[in-house]
Amino acid sequence: MVVVHAKATGNVQQVMFRQTIIRAMTKRGINGGATNLKTPARDTVEMTLDGDAATIQTFLDALRTTQPLNSWGARVDALVVLSTGRAVRDHQVTTTNVDDRSWNPNVEFYI
């Protein structure tokens, strides 16, 4: 088991990106969290993933494809693994609280 911190840049805010990746993590047995970073371009999300190293690597590789991740056009243009980051529980959206939020139901997940 490993903990990986990463930062995704691209079309990742206001497009259901956090919900998309958190549900994808849950599907793969990864514990994780995601937080929108306050950048002028609103184009960055920080994430923490906790789980099997190979599963996490496969997941990160899937994010790097630059293909749309959902029907709202969420897309990662660049993904950087960070040396440190916040704990899963300190993120805005996590695999344990994702269902506590009121999400728009009109989104299809591709990942």
Image (tube, grey):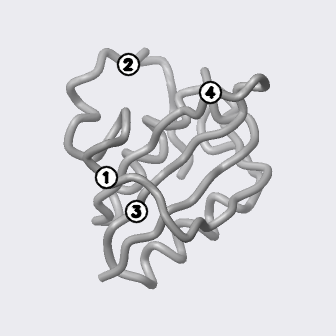
First reached walking from the N terminus: tag 3 or tag 1? 3
Give the CA separation, mark 2 to mark 1.
Answer: 20 Å
Mark 3 and mark 2 residues within 8 Å of each other at the beta carbon = no
Q: Is residue 34 found left or right of 2 in the rendered image?
A: right
Name the spot of residue 49 as percent of width and height, x first.
40, 62
**Within 10 angstroms of label 4, few (less than 14), some, or many (20 or more) residues?**
few
Q: Quadrant of residue 58?
A: bottom right
Give the CA separation, mark 3 to mark 2.
Answer: 22 Å
As shown in the figure, which amino acid type bears the numbered disc 2? Answer: Trp
> Of discs 2 and 4, which sits in the foreground?
4
State the mark number for residue 103.
Answer: 2
**Within 10 angstroms of label 1, few (less than 14), some, or many (20 or more) residues?**
many
First reached walking from the N terminus: tag 2 or tag 1? 1
As shown in the figure, which amino acid type bears the numbered disc 4? Answer: Lys
Which residue is the site of mark 3?
49
Q: Quadrant of residue 1?
A: bottom left
Name the spot of residue 13 as percent of width and height, x first.
62, 28
Which residue is the site of mark 1?
88
Which residue is the site of mark 4?
38
